[in-house]
Structures are given as structure tokens and as C-alpha cells.
Image (cartoon, rainbow, N blue to C red):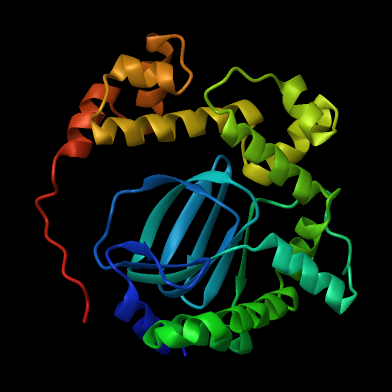
């Protein structure tokens, strides 16, 4: 079954990664080793069909291998590194409303989740779930079938996910007052204000928690403190803008929220190993190695 899913991804993935005609479905196909990259993951599930990928967020790290799935419950800045290539995966962005509606329909709340769940959870794919995911991706072979059938297969995937080891975490995320839901609200709030000065008291007020409780739950969920989380967002966006080459280092530092160019240079070099200007030059230099897609 993994071979069948891998073949479907190969038929329809354009470049290393691409969105598809199916809502909330993206495909990833990489054949050559690549450098670790900083990315902002949104709530989603990555179903790995081939290879292996490590994602690191602060003090937390997970490796998802072929036949496994990785759930990201919040907006999370991570460093992604391929540990085994060729790498193939199908990525489903979570539809919170659809999950909540299904939970109500099933009339279940499930067992209580731990007070703080990590922002990323790994589990094996059951055969029934893998079959549903494969059929979902294979709808791309028949575009006329996508509109009538994709929502139905997606609903089946949701059902099987609720019956999987992810079920408890997904149910907790659908509860408005759960810790998972609060952390999702807080991380999204920070993402929308990453370039602004933030205080722990203001973030705690959004979470309706004391500063000490916020810090404990936030660190358990993301692997980092709220202010370090904001720093990662700033540096990731700065690196993206540096690679684009449409502004100076000083302009970019100010745009992402740094008032001190010295602090920006120091934190950037500590994170990426080079000063911003040198890293920008390297990022804009085309790689000499050519990549060949596997047939």
C-alpha cells in the first residue's frame, strides 16, 4: 500500500512540494539530500510514504519514517531535515470545523488528554487509514471525481484519525477550553504579531492563564518559551526576505521587529551559522548539483 501511495504522489507532485486540486491536500517529493530548512508548520498531518524526515522545534524533535504520520497541532516554527531520501509524503491541513462536527455526530468526547500535549505527535498509520489516504490522493487521477468524492473520503480519514492514537489529541483540539486549543490560539496570536513587542503578561491574558502556567504549558507544547518562539518566527521571515533580495539587511531587521541591528546580526548568526549578508549571498547562489526525479 505504501508503494501505491508513493506512486500516486510521484504522478502529481510538481517540484519538491505542491498544493493540489484537492482542498487541504499537499504533496512532497524530494530525491536528493537537502540542507535543513526553517519552516512554519500549520496544524496538519504529514503521512510519510517513503523516506524519513526529522522536525525540530526548540527542545523537541521527532523523526517520521515511511508508514508513520506526524501530527502538528499548532502553528509551529520548526527546522525540517530529511534523514532518508527519496522522501514522499501527503500532507493534510486540519479542518477543525469538520473534526468538531464529526465528534458531535459521534457523540463522544473521549478520554481526558494530559494537561499539556506536545505540538507534534507521531504514530503509525493503520492499514484502513493508509487505504483512505491513498484513495484520497488517487482522486487526482480523475479530476471530475474530486468535487463529489474528496469531501467524503476526507470525512472517512477524519473518522479513522479519531480512532487512531491521534484521537485524544484531536478531540482535545476541538474543545474550546482545552489546553491544546488555548495553545493553538496563543501561537496563532503571536504569529499575527511576530514583529511587535510582546510581553508574557499580554500572551498569558490571551491564553486566560497565569504567566507561570502559560510558560509551563507553552514550553511543553512548543519546546521553547513564548519569546523564543517569537524570535524563531522573526528569524525565519528575515531569512526568507534575505533570500528574496528585495531589501537591505537593516531594512529587513526593522521589518521583522528588531530595533537593534547588532542584536539581529548576533541572533541570526547564532541560528544559521553565518552573518545575514553572507547567508543571503549563499541563499541566492544557485546550487551546482542537479537533481533527477525518480521515475
Residue 99 drawn at (x, y percent): 73, 68
Residue at the left extreme? 288
Of 38 and 251, nearer the camera is 251
264 is higher (above) or lower (below) than 216: above
Q: Quadrant of the C terminus?
A: bottom left
Residue 88 drawn at (x, y percent): 38, 72
* Left or right position of 293 against 175: left
* Left or right position of 50 against 186: left
76 is higher (above) or lower (below) than 200: below
Q: Is residue 39 visible?
A: yes
Residue 136 drawn at (x, y percent): 51, 82
Residue 219, picture quadrant: top right
Residue 132 drawn at (x, y percent): 57, 86
Residue 129, picture quadrant: bottom right
Of 83 and 212, nearer the camera is 212
Residue under the image location 83 percent in, 56 percent down? 175
* Left or right position of 70 against 247: right
Q: Is residue 134 visible?
A: no
Of 209 and 228, nearer the camera is 209
Q: Total of numbered circles in the picture?
A: 0
Residue 197, picture quadrant: top right
Residue under the image location 23 percent in, 30 percent down? 245
Residue under the image location 50 percent in, 33 percent down? 232
* Left or right position of 295 against 183: left
Amino acid at each position: 500500500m505504501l508503494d501505491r501511495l508513493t506512486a500516486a504522489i510521484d504522478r502529481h507532485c510538481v517540484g519538491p512540494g505542491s498544493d493540489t486540486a484537492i482542498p487541504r491536500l499537499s504533496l512532497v517529493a524530494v530525491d536528493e539530500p537537502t540542507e535543513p530548512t526553517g519552516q512554519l508548520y500549520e496544524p496538519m498531518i504529514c503521512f510519510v510514504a517513503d523516506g524519513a524526515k526529522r522536525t525540530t522545534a526548540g527542545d523537541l524533535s521527532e523523526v517520521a519514517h515511511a508508514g508513520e504520520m506526524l501530527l502538528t497541532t499548532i502553528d509551529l516554527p520548526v527546522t525540517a531535515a530529511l534523514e532518508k531520501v527519496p522522501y514522499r509524503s501527503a500532507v493534510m491541513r486540519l479542518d477543525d470545523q469538520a473534526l468538531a462536527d464529526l465528534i458531535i455526530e459521534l457523540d463522544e468526547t473521549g478520554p481526558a488528554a494530559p494537561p499539556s500535549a506536545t505540538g507534534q505527535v507521531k504514530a503509525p498509520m493503520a492499514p484502513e487509514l493508509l487505504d483512505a489516504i491513498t484513495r484520497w490522493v488517487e482522486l487526482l487521477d480523475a479530476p471530475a471525481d474530486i468535487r463529489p468524492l474528496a469531501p467524503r473520503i476526507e470525512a472517512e480519514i477524519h473518522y479513522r484519525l479519531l480512532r487512531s492514537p491521534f484521537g485524544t489529541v484531536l478531540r482535545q483540539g476541538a474543545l474550546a477550553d482545552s489546553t491544546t486549543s488555548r495553545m493553538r490560539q496563543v501561537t496563532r496570536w503571536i504569529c499575527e504579531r511576530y514583529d511587535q513587542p510582546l510581553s508574557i503578561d499580554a500572551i498569558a491574558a490571551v491564553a486566560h492563564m497565569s504567566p507561570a502556567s502559560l510558560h509551563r504549558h507553552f514550553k511543553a507544547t512548543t519546546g521553547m518559551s513564548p519569546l523564543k518562539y517569537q524570535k524563531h518566527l522573526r528569524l525565519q521571515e528575515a531569512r526568507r526576505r534575505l533570500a528574496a533580495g528585495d531589501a537591505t539587511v537593516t531594512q529587513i531587521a526593522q521589518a521583522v521587529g528588531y530595533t537593534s541591528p547588532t542584536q539581529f546580526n548576533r541572533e541570526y548568526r547564532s541560528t544559521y551559522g553565518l552573518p545575514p549578508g553572507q547567508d543571503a549571498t549563499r541563499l541566492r547562489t544557485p546550487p551546482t548539483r542537479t537533481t533527477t526525479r525518480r521515475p
